[in-house]
Image (tube, grey):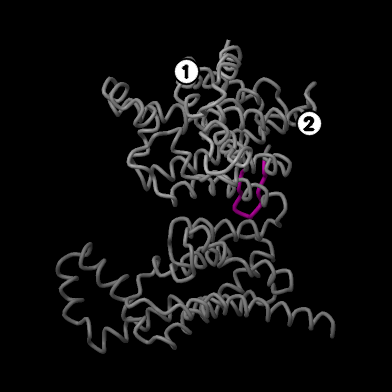
Amino acid sequence: MLVSHVLFCVMERPSVQCSSWWKLRSPTLQVWKSRLPIIVLPVLAGLRKLSWRERSNQIPNLETSSASEFALLFVIACGTGYLGLPFSVTWWFILLAAFTLQTELLLGVATIVSFSVLVGWYGVRLHHPHAVTALWGGTRNKGEREASIPRVCWHLWDFFVHALPATVVLYWHGPRVYLDGTIEPGTATVTASLTALPLNLLWLWGLGLALEPVNEEPWPWNLRLWPRHMLLKETNRVYGIAPELPLRAWQWVYGSHWGACTLLLCCHLLPSGAKLAYLVFAAFGLCRMPFTTAWWFTFLLSVFIDGLSPLFLGIVCCCAATTAIGWYGLQLFLPYVFQSLLSVWVFRPAERWAPKSISLLLHRFRNSCGLMLLMRFGDLLLHLVPTLTATWWLRSNLSFKVALAALPCNLIYLAFSRCTSLAQTNQMYGIHPEPPNYIWYCIYGSHWAFCIAVGAMCCFADVTG
């Protein structure tokens, strides 16, 4: 019945004004959009038995060939975008297809899209809570559905149609990370990751075909064929969120999908030590914690966990040296940095959270030589002593492969911190006044220069040895 209504809507589409088609879509599609999750939730029970953790053999491909699976996924993505349905509906159709056909490719793509929906949707809601209005159609249905149903019911509905299905699919079919750095990728194979990568762009392209053409140019150049005339922010034509989300939010939505596909692709292609190290730096960057805390976490893993790969230990060694070089090099160029960071990370938190007697004591002796010497001693214990210890203790793990793997660690941290420039790293530190741009180039460049130097010396030692 759904297919017949979709075909009816497509056949009845006006041939002159695409905007009229946008306004005259069949109400049946809106009904199906709200009822489709009710169909998908029982399907989750069937997806559980297909979990790769509960079966020893791969699910054999049925009568559907790989080419037809690719075509089915692309048709679902383009078709739902063309009909103006949310991308979560695309995900629900993929779940239904995975349950019906039971092939490794469809299960893998469903797992990856579940991950991207979970990260993209709740990442936007975290920074823009009013995005929840998209659940009832945004501004188009504001006077009807929002008034008739309490907002708490929409939050519960969101949990059952987004959070719960995506989480259980990830648990049943997604990767599993072990403390020794081993990652089992599950059904998210290389083919599935590459197939899922363009799905949100195909959805956007299908949406552009349904929008009104650009009238300034003659046909066919006036058609909204992505990427010539499509913008990410035009996604809001489907959701109707008001006030409209900024461009950065839509970049997060689309970028998180590509990041999820790339991350699961790396689970297959990278060695286990590099995967564990990159995961740590990415997680701390995502939480917008200083780079030093990320290195400290890797150092503690190397101390307390046995059996870690030499590649991971070598990355910890390289990053230990560059952490010390960057931190003390920064103080060499800008001596006021230490005092500024003490104010941000010690004195202000103490004034806010510590007992009043302690905060008054710190405020009283804030500029005393004794307190500064104590803070300098604490800095040595936090930065210099552990980094030198790790560099000396783990130096035997250094190699050209280790240096090459350690090279992008700070870039991975920067990318996941959502900073658009090196200078925006200061958002995690709070140095005031802000250092000039060349300082950040020196800090990041010192990491790359050290890794390149270590790699060159290892190659030279191998040649001469």
Residue at image position (47%, 25%) is 20
Q: Position of residue 17 (x, y in %)?
A: 51, 27
Q: Quick one: SS at disc 2?
A: helix
- In this figure, which residue is indicated by the disc labeled 1? 35
- In the image, 334 versus 305, the foreground residue is 334
- In this figure, which residue is indicated by the disc labeled 2? 67
In the image, residue 124 sits, relative to residue 434, either above or below, namely: above
Magenta range is: 176-186
Q: Position of residue 219 (x, y in %)?
A: 62, 38
- In the image, 301 versus 242, the foreground residue is 242
Residue at image position (18%, 64%) is 355
Q: Is residue 17 left or right of residue 188?
A: left
Residue at image position (64%, 38%) is 220
In the image, residue 377 sits, relative to residue 284, either above or below, namely: below
- The C terminus sits in image quarter: bottom right
Please, what is the three-letter code of the amino acid marked with disc 1? Answer: Arg
Q: Quadrant of residue 431?
A: bottom left
Q: Is residue 263 left or right of residue 28?
A: right
Q: What crowding class fits label 1: few (fewer than 14 Cα within 10 Å), some (14-19), or many (20 or more)? A: few
Q: Position of residue 174 (x, y in %)?
A: 61, 39
Q: Quick one: SS at disc 1?
A: helix
In the image, residue 153 sits, relative to residue 414, either above or below, namely: above
Q: Is residue 12 left or right of residue 346?
A: right
Q: Quadrant of residue 107?
A: top right
Q: CA distance from mark 1 to mark 2?
A: 30 Å
Please, what is the three-letter code of the amino acid marked with disc 2? Answer: Ala
Q: Main secondary structure of the magenta part?
A: loop
Whether the magenta-drawn stretch holds residue 181 is answered as yes
Q: Is residue 13 left or right of residue 190?
A: left
Mark 1 vs 2: CB contact within 8 A: no
- In the image, 218 versus 59, the foreground residue is 218
Q: Position of residue 350 (x, y in %)?
A: 24, 68
